[in-house]
């Protein structure tokens, strides 16, 4: 991460030389956030001024690896449909099988996803979660980043760097992936109508921005609840508007209730294109997928050598928390006994929650607490995963009008549209579990394709 070290030193030097200018720049970005109504959980979106740099070489490597892993995940989802032993592995979702097995009408079942990743520079990274249900940040982060780059302060900071945009830096990347799924499904309308749908008032983040950007791109768009969609005359309607695409911004475990039966029937009858697929939202989203992808038996049966190499290098060892025999670095182990004896190098997680909920770091638990967690959650939908140490970065912050420098944990998130690498965002936090919902900040990521020889002074 030499480029980041160099850039960070220069950035800190500028902040120290002109702290009032830095604080003024924070105010300018905060005004952009307020004017654009960028909120998360009812509060102003927290945003760090200091960027993280990714070289084009690093970004190209991210693309190569993530697309191999994305292809592996698609093979796993296909195996779920065809292989009863794989389906039994996800027995926790048996009550949802009818939904999960609905054919969405397109081949790649994961259209919009975000790989949450620990990165130590260059090719050293670990993907901890796949987020294939309805990941956050798909339109607002790129829009905010582009305005942030154009501020006078950041124009001076980035003067010697040549920035290359990611696909996820514009809302068109997200919107055209929805359209791509619709075309593959068989949709013919030049400008299909998109329903950005929630359920039970949850997950409002980005919906108004999705609608606005969709309308700017020429689509008709509505925001609605899944219960407000009605199947009439072989079409799905919101009020008197015929819907062609649904983007589900929902908790997948709430799907399938009687009050949304019209939506379910419309998807079954191929009257509407639903994104992501239910197979993606339930099974792809499950962290138990990582337990299969890192399992030698599954790998040998389903994956190519390149896919196996990418997984073994970039997904930490993961297993379902069950009383069974497995392997760890070619050693035969009992999963539960291994988990109890190696708490300091493991993480315990439920497979299907978001925003850092129900994640337990073994080194932060007493042995008694850890053993109880294992006993309470064994043989269910929990996983153990090898702990990946979270790197730190030093950032300047505004503390009531004064600039202070503090160390923050950071991670990167890689967006995938239709199984293709779409770019990187980042978050920083005081905590090892990095999540904006738990006090974290968004951190802009810039792909640098060239560094001018002239030094910034």
Image: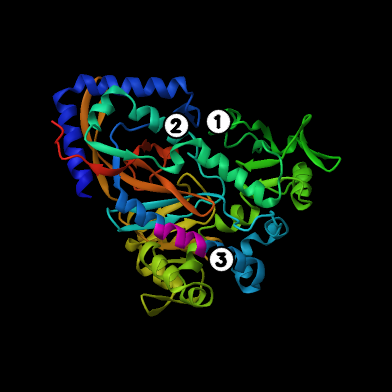
N-terminal of the pair, mark 2 or mark 3, is 3
Point out the stretch of residues depicted in magenta. 64-72
Q: Residues within 10 Å of mark 2 (few under 14, many from 20)?
A: some
Q: Say the numbered circle drawn on residue 271.
A: none
Q: CA distance from mark 3 to mark 1?
A: 33 Å
Q: CA distance from mark 2 to mark 3?
A: 33 Å
Q: Would you say the residues marked 1 and 2 are in contact, meaning their CB atoms lie under 8 Å apart?
A: yes
Tell me the residue that label 3 is attached to. 76
Residue sitting at x 69%, y 46%: 273
Instruction: Name the spot of residue 191 as percent of width and height, x first.
Output: 67, 36
Label 2 SS = helix
In the rendered view, would you say 7 is above or below 87?
above
In the rendered view, would you say 247 is above or below 93?
above
Q: Would you say the residues marked 2 and 3 are in contact, meaning their CB atoms lie under 8 Å apart?
A: no
Tell me the residue that label 1 is attached to. 213
Quadrant of the image containing the C terminus: top left
N-terminal of the pair, mark 3 or mark 1, is 3
Tell me the residue that label 2 is attached to. 143
Instruction: Name the spot of residue 57 as percent of width and height, x first.
Output: 30, 53
274 relative to 344 in the view: left or right: right
Please identify the dominant SS of the magenta region.
Answer: helix
266 relative to 348 in the view: left or right: right
- Pick the residue in front: 186 or 127: 186
Label 3 SS = helix
In the rendered view, would you say 334 is above or below 391?
below
Label 1 SS = helix
């Amino acid at each position: 991460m030499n480029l980041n070290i160099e850039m960070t030193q220069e950035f800190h030097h500028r902040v120290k030389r002109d702290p009032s200018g830095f604080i003024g720049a924070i105010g300018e970005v905060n005004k952009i956030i307020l004017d654009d109504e960028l909120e998360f959980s009812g509060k102003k979106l927290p945003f760090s001024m200091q960027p993280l740099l990714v070289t084009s070489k690093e970004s190209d490597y991210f693309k190569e690896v993530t697309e191999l892993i994305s292809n592996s995940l698609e093979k796993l989802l296909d195996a779920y449909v065809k292989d009863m032993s794989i389906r039994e592995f996800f027995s926790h979702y048996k009550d949802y099988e009818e939904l999960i097995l609905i054919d969405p009408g397109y081949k790649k079942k994961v259209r919009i996803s975000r790989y949450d990743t620990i990165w130590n520079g260059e090719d050293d990274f670990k993907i901890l979660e796949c987020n294939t249900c309805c990941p956050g940040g798909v339109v607002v982060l790129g829009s905010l980043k582009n305005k942030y780059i154009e501020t006078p302060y950041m124009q001076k900071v980035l003067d010697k760097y040549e920035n290359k945009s990611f696909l996820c830096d514009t809302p068109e990347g997200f919107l055209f992936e929805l359209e791509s799924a619709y075309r593959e499904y068989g949709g013919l309308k030049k400008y299909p109508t998109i329903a950005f749908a929630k359920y039970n008032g949850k997950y409002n983040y980005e919906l108004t921005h999705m609608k606005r950007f969709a309308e700017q791109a020429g689509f008709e768009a509505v925001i609605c609840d899944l219960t407000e969609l009605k199947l009439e005359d072989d079409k799905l309607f919101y009020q008197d508007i015929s819907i062609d695409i649904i983007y589900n911004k929902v908790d997948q475990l709430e799907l399938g209730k009687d009050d949304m039966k019209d939506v379910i029937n419309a998807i079954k009858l191929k009257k509407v294109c639903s994104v992501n697929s239910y197979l993606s939202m339930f099974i792809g989203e499950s962290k138990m997928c990582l337990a299969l992808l890192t399992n030698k038996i599954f790998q040998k049966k389903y994956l190519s050598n390149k896919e196996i190499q990418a997984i073994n290098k970039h997904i930490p060892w993961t297993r379902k928390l069950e009383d069974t025999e497995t392997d760890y670095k070619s050693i035969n182990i009992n999963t539960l006994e291994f988990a109890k004896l190696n708490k300091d190098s493991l993480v315990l997680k439920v497979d299907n929650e978001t925003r850092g909920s129900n994640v337990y770091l073994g080194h932060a638990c007493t042995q008694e607490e850890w053993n109880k967690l294992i006993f309470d959650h064994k043989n269910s939908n929990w996983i153990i995963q090898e702990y990946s140490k979270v790197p730190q970065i030093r950032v300047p912050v505004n503390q009531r009008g004064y600039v202070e420098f503090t160390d923050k944990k950071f991670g990167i998130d890689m967006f995938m549209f239709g199984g293709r690498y779409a770019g990187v965002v980042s978050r920083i936090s005081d905590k090892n579990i990095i999540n904006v919902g738990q006090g974290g900040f968004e951190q802009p990521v810039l792909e640098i394709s060239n560094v001018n020889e002239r030094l910034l002074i």
